[in-house]
Amino acid sequence: MTSVETRANPIADLVRDAAAARTPLRIAGRSHWIDAGRPVRATRIASLATHAGVVDYVPGDLTITLRSGTTLRDIENVTAAEGQWFPSDPFGSTDGTIGATIATGSFGPLAHGFGRTRDLVLGLEFVTGDGRTVQGGGRVVKNVAGFDLVRLIAGSWGSLGVITEVTLRLYSIHEQPVTMMLSIPETRTALAQRLRSVIAAPLTPYAVEIVSGQLAAHIGLPARPVLLVKLGGNPASIAAQQATLGALGGVSEAPAGVWEKLRLAEDKVRSADSVASARARSAHSASGFDTTVTSPIVMRLSSLQSRVAEMWTVVAAATSGVDGALVHASPGLGIVRCVIPTGPGRDVIAKIASALPDVTTIWERLPAAMWQDLSPDVASDRLSLGIRNAFDAQGILNPGIMGPAA
């Protein structure tokens, strides 16, 4: 970990001023996720949306350093011009920022082939709660110094520091990827066998994702559960992988654009008016968080890869007949993710919890009133509180986002 105080940093100045006045800050990028996470007790929004742009790009090293307010779309455009890309596809618009993506620990189906977003972060710079500017990691692939610090900040939801710069690992763009669509059986045993066959096959897929029938219809596919497999590489490699999948039976090619539709599916079922009003009122409310938002509940179940079929069948049964419930899973990661309308949400959650009591549940979005019942905190243990105190002793950065400060 290295402190940096040799150049002007407007974000550090903002945090120092807030710390001196003991003013809690709600850290935000472009505010697409301002309604996510636990209620934040802040009176001021600290937006990094204008803190954007490329700091350093070395195509030959497959690395790029950016200010944290740079959007994912801008990263895509800049790197594509050099025949490269940043393989991270968190759910939501590419108008979101890279800083918010890392801070929230967001990732998408491409994590199957390339790792979660945090695995693609080589280094970062952030501002602590007392205004210190700190760097961790490095700007080259071989530099692993501070790697643990990078992982500590990634997924901390801005509670330990405000990310100001990031250095990312890039990949070369190959031929246009092809997505294959496989039928999946209804029974748990048969589904488990189907997934094992695909995962164990001699493939190097970019992504492997199950989508429910309702979600499939939502993204322009036949209204039945299917397994999507995204294949990349040179033409010969793609052809060989297609033949391998074809031998498993029940395989067809999916239409173009299916992954982009999947990425945006959740946004389309959220109430645009509710989100817009949340952003507007958050900037002026005493709490910094609008408790009237009616966004759907978003939960993520996580366990061993071998339990995905079990989790899938439980969730499928719990959401059966629930209009607007969108379910998908990343079998290679051991994750089943559910987007559930708020109305029937409690009943669905209760059914899942009773059938899968030992599965880890991560809540992405909940109505404010439900956080206390389902997940009041995730960082109240002695170690977590010690870390929080070391980076933000006054607790001014996103207070409440990880639970009570003490």
Image (spheres, rainbow, N blue to C red):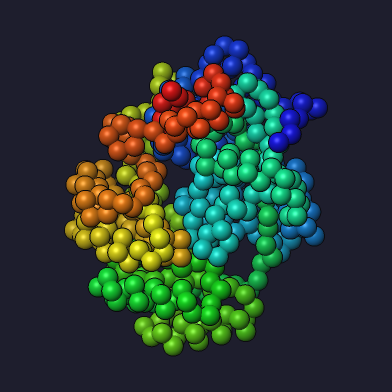
Image coordinates of residue 33 in percent, x first then y, are 46, 39
Answer above or below: position of 28 versus 166.
above
Q: Nearer the viewer, residue 90 or 256?
A: 90
Which quadrant is home to the N terminus?
A: top right
Can residue 348 be seen at all in this image of the molecule? no
- Quadrant for residue 19, please give it: top right
Q: Nearer the viewer, residue 142 or 75?
A: 142
Q: Nearer the viewer, residue 245 or 343?
A: 245
Going by the picture, which residue comes out furthest to the front? 382
Which quadrant is home to the C terminus?
A: top left
- Quadrant for residue 393, please give it: top right
Q: Which residue is pictured at 46% across the width and 22% down the height?
A: 42
Q: Which residue is pictured at 80% across the width and 27% down the height?
A: 6
Q: Which residue is pictured at 44% across the width and 88% down the height?
A: 247
Total numbered badges shown on the rendered structure: 0
Left or right of 18? Residue 182 is: left
Image coordinates of residue 251 in percent, x first then y, are 40, 82
- Quadrant for residue 210, please give it: bottom left
Image coordinates of residue 145 in percent, x first then y, are 72, 45
Q: Which residue is pictured at 69% across the width and 65% down the height?
A: 172
Left or right of 2? Residue 400 is: left
Going by the picture, which residue comes out furthest to the top? 21
Image coordinates of residue 169 in percent, x first then y, are 68, 55
Left or right of 108? Residue 351 is: left
Answer above or below: position of 228 versus 202.
above
Answer above or below: position of 387 versus 89.
above
Can residue 112 be seen at all in this image of the molecule? yes
